[in-house]
Image: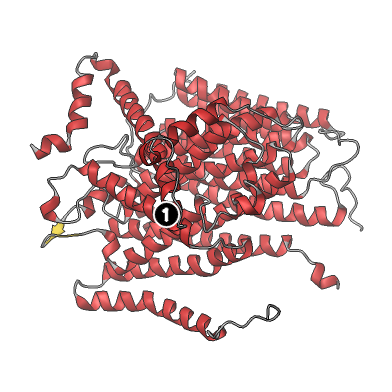
Amino acid sequence: MSSLQSYLLLSALLFSIGLAGALTRRNAILVLIGIELMLNAANLNFIAFWRYGPTPSKLTGIMFAIFSISVAAAEAAVGLGIILAAYRHSKTTDLDQMNSLKG
Amino acid sequence: MTAAFLILATLTVAGTAAAMGLRNAVHCVLALTVGFAGVAALYLQLDAQFVGFTQVMVYVGAVAILAVFAIMMTHSPTPVPLPAYSRHWLAGSIVAAAVFAVLAWAIRAGSTSAPCLPPQPGISVQQIGDALMHRYVLPLEIMGLLLTAALIGAVVIAMDRKEESK
Amino acid sequence: MTQTLDQIFVIAKAWLLGYLPVAARPLASAVLCVIAIVITFPLLFAITTWLERKGLGRIQNRLGPNRTGPFGLFQPIADAIKSLTKEDIVPLTADHAVHFLAPLLLVAAAFLAYAVLPVGRNMVLVNLNAGVLFFFAVGSVVELSVFMAGWSSRSKYSLLGAMRAIAQMISYEVPLVLATVAVIMQAGSLSTVDIVNQQATYTHTLPHWFVFTPWGFVGFVLFMIAATAESNRSPFDLPEGESEIIAGYYIEYSGFKFALFFLGEYLGMFATSGMAITLFLGGWAAPFSFLTWIPSYVWFFLKLLALIGFFIWIRGTLPRLRMDQLMNLAWEFVLPMALLNMLVAGVWHFMPHGLLRWLVCTAIVAIPCILLAAGLKRKKKFQVRTYQFAE
C-alpha cells in the first residue's frame, strides 16, 4: 500500500468517525463537532492529493484547504449561535427532544 | 508508511475517537483538540506548512474555544445526567461503518502503482499570497463577504432577546 | 574579534557538533538550541520576578524584598524552594486529569513560541518560512490551557476568571495580529529572520527599525497594548487580580503547579516582547551603526529587559480596567486603529520616498487620535473636585 493510500485511508477513517459521532450523539454541540471532523478529513484528503499529485506547484490543493478551513470556521460560529438560540428556547441541547416544529 | 506517519495517525484517530465517544462534553472537546493538532502535524508531514499553522490557529485556537464556550453556556446540571448517545445509536454506527467500508474498498481498489513521492514542492508563503491575489482573488473576496455575513449572523442569532419581550 | 564574540554561541555549537556523527547532527543541533532556550528564559524569569518586586516596591514608595541576600537578590531562590515544598492540594471534585494537564500545556505552548525568535545574528532555532504565523498559532493554544485550568477546578471563581480571561485574550488577539500584518506588508515576508535582516541596515548611523516610521510607531503601541492584554498583565489583569477574583482561574492551584502557571505567564510575556522586538525594534540590531561591535544577543536581551521594565512600570502606574472597559477598548479603539494602521502601511509602501510620505502617513494616523482625545475631553469638565458627603 502506497503512502497516498495510507493517507486516504486515514482520512476515510476520520470521516467515518466524525459521521458516527454526528449520527449517534445527543448533544447538539457534539454533533457539530462531528461535522467539523468530517470537514477536517476532507481537508486532509485535499492536501494528500495535492502533495502526491502531478503538479504541486499549482497550489490548488492548498487553496482549497485554506478556503475550506475558513468556511468551516464561519459555519461553526453560525451553528453554535443557532444552538445557543435553540437552547434558550427549549432549555435543552438534547437533539432527541427537539423533534417537534411547534412551540 | 513511515514511523512518523504511524504515530501521528494513531494519535489523531485516538483523539477523534475519544472526542466522539466520551461522555463528558468538555472532555470530548479537549480530545478533539488533540485530534486537530494531530491533523495539523500530518499537514506538516505533507509539506503544507501554511495550512498546518492555519489549522492550529483556526481550529485549536478558535473553533475549539467556541465549542467550549457553547458547552459552558448550555450546561444545565440535570438531576439525572442525560444519556450520551441517542436512541438510534446502532443505526448511526452501522451507517458510519458502511461508509468507511465503501471508502476503504474504493481506496484499495484504486491504482496501487501510485507514483512515488514527488520531490518537495518548497511552497513559500509568498507564492500562496501571490496565488490568492492573482488567480484566486474572487474566492478570497467572496470568503471575506461570507465571513462578514457569518459574523453578523452569529451575533444576531445568539443575541439575548430579552429587551424585545419587555 | 567582534565577529567571533558575536557568533561565539554558533561557533561553540558547531564545535560540539563536530564530535558527533553526521547523521545525528541535525537532531543534536536542535536539542542543543532547545537546552539553551530552556536554560536562558527561566533564568530570565527568575531575574524578572526579583526585578518586578523591587521595581513595584520602589514605584509604590517602599523597599521590595531586601532580606534574602544583598538587595534581596536570592528572593527567586527562596520563592522556588517555597513553591516546590508546598503541599499540592487538588479539590476533591476537581477533574484530576485536566487539572494536571493545564499548567503543562501552558508551559509547553509558551516554550514553543521561542522557536522562531532570532536572539542574535544566525541564532534562531528554526528559520520557518511562516515564522510569524507559527508564533501566533502557538499563542492561541494558551487560551485553551487557561480554560482547562478554570474549568477543571470546579469552582465558581475559577470558572468566572477563566471565562473573562479567554474573552479578553480572544478579543485582543485580533488587534495583535493586525498590528503585525502592517509589518509583514512592509517586510514582504513572514519569516522573522527576514524581518530582522531588513531592519539591520543603517542610513547615516540611524537604524531602519520599523518603530521609527509612523505606521511602525502606532503599530508598536497597539502591539504592546494587545500584548499586555494577552499576558493578562495589569492594567488588564481583571481575570487574575488579587483584589478582584483572588487569582481567578488558578485559584485552586498550589505549590509547583502554581509556579508553573506563573512561569508560563511570564514566558508568554517574554515571547510577545521578543516578537515586538523582532517586528518593530530591529531584533538583534544595534541602535546606531557605530555600536555594532557589541554582540547581537546582548542587544536583544537589553531590549527585552527594557520592555520588561516597561511592563513593570505600567503595572505599577495604571489602575486596573473593568471588564467592559477592557472589551470596549479592544473592539472600539485598538481594532479600528490597527485597521487604519494597515492602511497607512500600504500608503507608505506605495508613496515615493520623501517628506510628503511622512507628513501624509503621520496625518492619517494622528488625526483620529486627536479627534478621539478632543471628543473624550469634551465630555469631562476638569474642575476642582468637590466632595458630596464628606464635608
Q: Position of residue B117 (x, y in %)?
A: 38, 26
- At a point 57% along the width and 60% down the height, the residue shown is B146
Quadrant of residue C325 within the rendered picture: bottom right
Of residues C216 and C259, the one nearer the viewer is C259
Of residues C305 and B50, the one nearer the viewer is C305
- At a point 53% along the width and 27% down the height, the residue shown is C84
Number of numbered discs visible in the structure rendering: 1
- Residue farthest to the left? C1
Q: What SS does tag 1 mark?
A: helix
Q: Is residue C154 left or right of residue A77?
A: right
Where the C terminus of chain C falls, by quadrant? bottom right
Chain letter of disc 1?
C
Where the N terminus of chain C falls, by quadrant? top left
Residue B35 in view in this figure: no
Q: Position of residue C138 (x, y in %)?
A: 47, 41
Q: Is residue B135 left or right of residue C201?
A: right
Coloring applied to the structure: secondary structure
Give the answer, above or below, for where C340 lies relative to B98: below
Give the answer, above or below, for where C280 lies relative to C45: below
Residue B134 in view in this figure: yes
- At a point 70% along the width and 65% down the height, the residue shown is B156
Quadrant of residue B151 within the rendered picture: bottom right
Q: Position of residue C353 (x, y in %)?
A: 19, 71
Q: Which residue is mark 1?
A: C58
Disc 1 marks a residue whose amino acid type is Arg
